[in-house]
Structure formats: structure tokens, C-alpha cells
Image (spheres, rainbow, N blue to C red):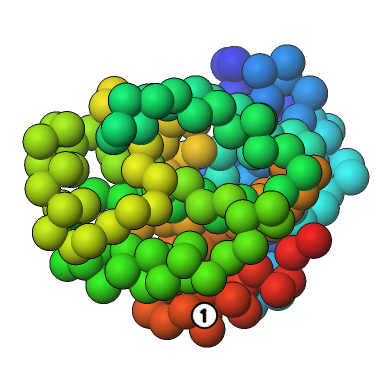
Amino acid sequence: MNADGSNQTRLTSDPASDKIPTWSPDGKKIAFQSNRDGKWGVYVMDADGSNQKKLADGWAPAWSPSGRAPDFSLPTLDGNTITLSNYRGKIILLNFWVALPSTRIELPVLQQAYDKWPKDKYVMLTINVKESDKDVQLFVTKNGLTLPVLLDKTGDVAAMYGVTARPTSFLIDSRGIIREIKLRPFRTVEEVSESLNKID
């Protein structure tokens, strides 16, 4: 509709379940979440409502008109800097977390999966959101974690990905496309493997 509320037009085919629209920076596309097929997914369409397609399972979409994972650079707990795009060509599990009970279950599972992964094919990046370096280090040490831990001290990267709940994981294929958004913790190594096996 226009700014004054006139010329209202229904753009999507299922307005009852299509929610949380997010405009692209150039105003040409809209990302939104929908439960059209009985499973929440992230969709994208042109600004006039045409060319609607599902990008990934999950909800609360971050803006990415092609489904490509937004690039970022973040410091690690051990003082290095990691840039996501440097891992193009590999399958990436990107996990946002804070020190909650669900994380105490999930991160040891992710550690087990990380220990078994062929590093020439898979990358795992865990991102702590807005907790102090000291608290993160205590958590990592207490749980015996050696997997990569990045620090999103401002929460900007979590916001860029539309993360509203933690833990949230993104499965990203070798072309940099988000293939799955998981809004609950992984509870077994087999569950991690099942998600990874869907991706090329």
C-alpha cells in the first residue's frame, strides 16, 4: 500500500500464514516466513508478489534475496579473526549461542561432531552473542570445548541473521546458500549428521 494507506494489495498467496516481511535494501524483493506446507520456512518474492520461492526451513528470516548467508568478520576467543566468506567451497554449520541450559546440552554434541568432521569439507563456527570474554572462556573451559568460538560482542551479526532465539543454527552449503535454519538445539551427533547429509 501507499504511505497514506491507499492502494492496498495482497501480495502473497497465503496471507494467513505469511508473516514478518523484510524488504531488501534496494526495495526490489521481500523475505518472509510462512507455514504453507505445514512446516515453517523462509521465503522470498519480488516486490510485486511474483516469483515466490522457499529458501530454507526455519523462520524469522534475515534479509538475503538469493538465500546467501550474509558475510561477516568476528574475533575469536583465542584472539584471531574469522571471515565467513573465506570458507566458501565448504559446508558450514553456524551456531549462535549464549550460556543457557540448552547450550550446555548442545555444544558438547557439536564438539563431538566437530572432532569427527573431515576439516577439508566441513566448517563449524559457534558464535557467542553479547556475553563477556571472561564468561565465555569459563564456559568453554568448563565444558572442554576446542571448537571455534567467535564473539559477537555487539549482537550485530546475530541481528543481521535475524536471530531472535538461542541456540539457532544455520546450515550453509558450499556455494554460501543457507539451506536450513534450526531453531532448537542439536541433541545427538546423529541429528547433526542428518542435517549435514542433506547439503552439498
* Depicted 112 relative to depicted 51: above or below: below
**Which quadrant of the figure contains the C terminus?**
bottom right
**Which quadrant of the figure contains the N terminus?**
top right
Q: Quadrant of residue 155?
A: top left
Question: Along the line of sight, which residue is nearer the eye, 29 or 63?
Answer: 63
Q: Is residue 166 visible?
A: no
- Horizontally, residue 162 falls left or right of residue 132, namely right
Query: Label 1, on which residue?
Result: 191
Q: Amino acid at mark 1?
A: Glu
Where's residue 194, x and y in %?
Answer: 62, 79
Q: Quadrant of residue 185?
A: bottom left
Question: Along the line of sight, which residue is nearer the eye, 39 or 167?
Answer: 167
Where's residue 19, x and y in %?
Answer: 56, 51
Instruction: Tell me the residue at 49%/23% (across/down).
Output: 73
Structural crowding at the residue carrying mark 1, measured as other residues with C-alpha within 10 Å and reported as few (<14), some (14–19) or many (≥20): few
Question: Along the line of sight, which residue is nearer the eye, 118 or 154?
Answer: 118
Circle 1: element type: helix
